[in-house]
Image (cartoon, rainbow, N blue to C red):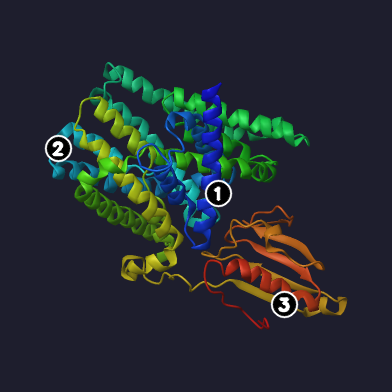
Amino acid sequence: MPHAADTLMALGGAFVVCALVARAGGRLGLPTVPLFMLAGVVFGPSTPGIDLVSDPEDLELVARLGLVFLLFYLGLEFTLDQLASGGAKLVRAATVYLVLNVGGGVAYGFWVGWGAPEASVIAGVVGISSTAIVTKVLVETRRLGNRETRTILGIAVIEDIFLAFYLALLQPILGGADNVAEAVQGIATAFAFLVTLGAIARYGAQQVGRLVSTHDEEIVVVLFVGLAVTTAGVAEALGVSDAIGAFMVGLILGATAKAGRLRTLTHPLRDAFGAIFFFHFGLTIDPGQVVGVLPQIAVAVVMTIVLATAAGVIAGRMYRFTRVEAGNIGFTVLTRGEFSVILASLAVAAGLDQRISSLAAGYVLVLAIVGPVAAAHSDVVSRLIPNRLLRPGETTWGETPLDLEAGVGSLHHLGSELLQVTVTPGSRLHGVHVWELRLPVGVTLGLLARDGSTRSLEDDTVLRVGDVLLVFTRPELRLTAERRILAVHRAGRLAHWRGETGD
């Protein structure tokens, strides 16, 4: 019982600390991911002062739930058709990313002076991005509706498939599989699992949707938590990461009619447990071990920034993205996380160079800070990317404004005006629920045009890039409605109005 009490106090303290640092960082415009991780470092067993959590394993299960809910929510935001829309182009973009970053990792390993075994391991440490941090960055920056986000997610999914092959190839070094046949069997099993879940998402979503077709929210929450956790566990057992398992079951439920409701119910679980995931990650980092390899860490960080940005620019050319959209790809997939540290630990346990562990810890911590900050301020950082690297004629940040049009026309004699809002790339309106616009009483939600179809607007509708909203308002309330919409939009960048707004 004393141990249970200690664990509960540690968990509660972790929640409180995460809330306080997030509140303080929010006032400074800082993303929460590095703040949660730094809180774990400061209040962990490897630093002097308050030892909030003496054993990181006490919070390991709760942290894994955080990873599950982060990826489950991300899956809810998309459909299989959206992710597959990139086709061969997406595969090429992901291949470019892997060749640059994993290949750069191999070259870096030899540059440090290590042999082939260490270089093979360090290639994964510096070449594979953190799915959890990528997800959190996308959510925090409200870029789930951006058109480049599909490319980012596609790269993450293909990275995970590559990971299954990569780990199998490393088994002779890490001491896992006894022979090649066992390694091949593991790869085939993992691939079959992903294909099965993909088929369910494509053809069986309607049947799965019947499980959550109840008005009892308690049952819905218990059920989707069970599905997400169970699928994550099965994925882990079959050699696929638990993260991708949770993502796939979210993808399945995201194709059902209850997807919007599930997103709303998942929000608090995602935010609370996700904070503990990053806090727990910080607990595993020992700053004292990092000092001896600071020069090697600096080289690895610079190399990764250059290669990830280059991969984003190449993907931007493929998709004819703007400079900021290309930068968003590079800066978002820049972060490294739990896989890098785990892989380094396995390498040390297998008798490889001990410096791998210290290098991985410092490298991950630096990129966990640099990556989210760069992604959150991509409108500024992307200016470092020369325009000539993208296709001629592509627009740059700020050239596509928020589109607000107030029409009078035939509605005027009825005492109404029609406000049309187009959510453009780069606007902070995407990822926002309609109720967050705080439209005044007397302003009526109309229609939403998305992907060639029209639907009714509801308070819980989540806005995405490309959406066109039609809102009816009384003439005297039009300017108030416009100002409130712009208040959200301006959180990301300055707005430009089309037509007369009176602001």
Of badges 2 and 1, the one in the foreground is 1
Label 3 – label 1 distance at C-alpha = 36 Å
Q: Residue at x 62, y 69 (%)?
A: 487
The answer to whether any part of residue 87 appears in the image is no
Q: On screen, 345 above or below 437? A: above
The quarter of the image holding the C terminus is bottom right
**Label 3 environment density (alpha carbons within 10 Å; few <14, some 14–19, many ≥20):** some
Element on which disc 1 rests: helix
Which amino acid type is marked by label 1?
Answer: Ala
Which amino acid type is marked by label 3?
Answer: Leu
Which amino acid type is marked by label 2?
Answer: Trp
- The percent position of residue 17, horizontal first and vertical second, equals 52, 46
**Label 1 environment density (alpha carbons within 10 Å; few <14, some 14–19, many ≥20):** some
- The residue where tag 1 is placed is 19
Label 2 – label 3 distance at C-alpha = 65 Å
Q: Specify the label residue 479 is tagged with.
A: 3
Q: How many marks?
A: 3
- Depth order, front residue of 323/480: 480
- The residue where tag 2 is placed is 114
Q: Earlier in the sequence, mark 2 or mark 3?
A: 2
- The percent position of residue 100, horizontal first and vertical second, equals 27, 48
Element on which disc 3 rests: helix
Q: Quadrant of residue 163?
A: top left
